[in-house]
Image: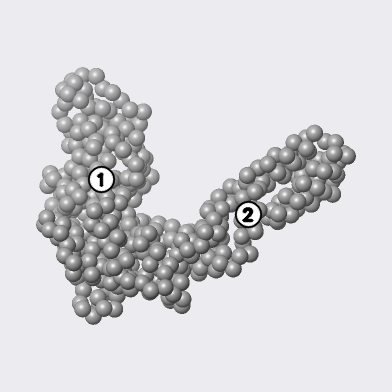
Amino acid sequence: MSCPPSLRPALLGQVLRTVARPYRVAAMATASAETLEANPATMLAVAIDRARAAQAQGDAPDTAQQHLFVQALSRLIRDAMRAERGDPAFQAMVLRHRVAHVREYASLSAHADSDRRRVRSIVDAVAHPGKGRETAPLPAPLARLHEFASSASWTALAAAARQLTLATDTVPDARLQRGLARLLDNPALQRLQRLEALASDDLVRQHRALLDRNGPRAGSAAAVEQGRTTQQRGAAVEASAAQALHMLARRLNAAQAADAYRVVTSMCVPASIPGSADRAKTEWDAVLLRRAAPIARMPGPVAQTADGCGTASAAGNADAGAEWDVCLLVEAKASIDAAATDFPRLLRGLRLLAGADANTLYPFTTQQGVVCLRGASLRTLDADTDADADDIGTPVLYCCDVPADAAPRLLSAASRMQLLSAPASLEYASRLARNQPVDALQLAPVWQALLSSPRWHAVLHQYQTLRRARALMVHVADLAAAIDALPVDP
């Protein structure tokens, strides 16, 4: 991800070198003996990173590392299964693993919203008050039908529909008969009845209580409010980061006595960039751009885009409007841990940009309008997956407004959950829940998968991902301070 000096002004390089990096962590996952004893998650992070380092040197991790890993995972599972201070999300997962009808309830619940919409749509077609129900045959039974659907009384709804079907034999109504047949034959109603029947089961109730303890349910008013708050915090960080970049652009312009630098926000990657955008970052929060110097090109036809950028090739010339180079990409995050979660997506986004054709201008939409970026500039953003986290010249920053954590969490939330949700871990936890004897070596299959399965690659490298992401993270106030400390007359 290094940026060629030709595209990095000296003052920007100075900012990247001097800005405080309070979120950085050590090159290897390490911890004191006391910390390892007290924190199984940290113990796991250390064991996993030692295994990664051994494999990187062509060695196989020794049995001592396996012992450390399975003991730490055993403790992590035991802690998560504690009744009072455990992990309700994991406990719900274990309950689904143990009990078939709880698993069935969870599966039915996942599709319940669409099933409810489908059933209510069928009922509305025959029994909605606004569709002439009062003048139709059997208005009172139709009213009950609609009431049961509105109150989510699915068993009562099915019973009422069957009674109404019998009544239509004496009061013929072809449209009503077809609607009732559609309702009773629909698998959605059958699934909702089964869901309603399971809801009164004690273990299902326990499962629902665990989910409620884990936080607001998706789609609930509390979840919506929580999401709105997080979004507002992220927007505030983004605004602060953009403000700092504007300050930097002004300093750079003053140093060159020219209007060469500008800042754009919400910069969206155009579809014309070759390569796959799957799971890649395609919108960048704030970007520092430099006006590109005019380049002499071979005369020839110009392939203009709809947004006014030209396509330059060995036989073409496009110089309509300003052309820009990327100097610095900034992503705003409302939390420290969000950077490590986002980092793989950021790398894919950089690879996407680096796949640009060097002789093509690309139109990027931003909040400030369309800007035309040179492919040659984008190609310098190639993401090196083995890059050193100590490379402070990387032209990408994460910005945050949260104070640095005194004791960083070395095991990411995603890695922790993948370790806990492994089949061997769930079986181990299920045996604990049934008060059956367990042995930490029963978790050895998780260790073997970690070392050999591509599915576990992200977990094996999770500490290095965390380290690289945190090395790119700066506090917005520190960024502003580093810019403010630039010499007035460089």
The picture quadrant where one finds residue 234 is bottom left
Position of residue 303 relative to residue 103, above or below, is above
The spot of residue 392 in percent (x, y) is 16, 57
Which residue in the rendered view is the most extreme toward the right? 170
Residue 334 visible in the picture? no
Residue 350's disc number: 1
Residue type indicated by callout 2: Arg
Q: Secondary structure at mark 2?
A: helix
Q: How many marks?
A: 2
Q: Residue at x 65, y 48 (%)?
A: 189
Instruction: Using residue 176 as the reference point, say whether residue 119 is left or right of it.
Output: left
Circle 2 residues within 10 Å: few <14, some 14–19, many ≥20: some
Which residue in the rendered view is the most extreme toward the front? 437
Q: Which of labels 1 and 2 is toward the front?
A: 2
Q: Residue at x 26, y 41 (%)?
A: 353
Residue type indicated by callout 1: Leu
Which one is earlier in the sequence, the residue at label 1 or at label 2? 2
Residue 119 visible in the picture? yes
Q: Secondary structure at mark 1?
A: helix
Q: Residue at x 33, y 40 (%)?
A: 277
| Residue under numbered circle 2 | 194
Residue in the foreground of this view, choosing between 104 and 487:
104
The spot of residue 416 in percent (x, y) is 34, 64
Q: Residue at x 36, y 64 (%)?
A: 425
Which residue in the rendered view is the most extreme toward the bottom? 34
Circle 1 residues within 10 Å: few <14, some 14–19, many ≥20: many
Residue in the foreground of this view, choosing between 356 and 243:
356
Position of residue 479 relative to residue 2, above or below, is below
Residue in the foreground of this view, choosing between 462 and 270:
462
Residue in the foreground of this view, choosing between 169 and 254:
169
Residue 325's disc number: none
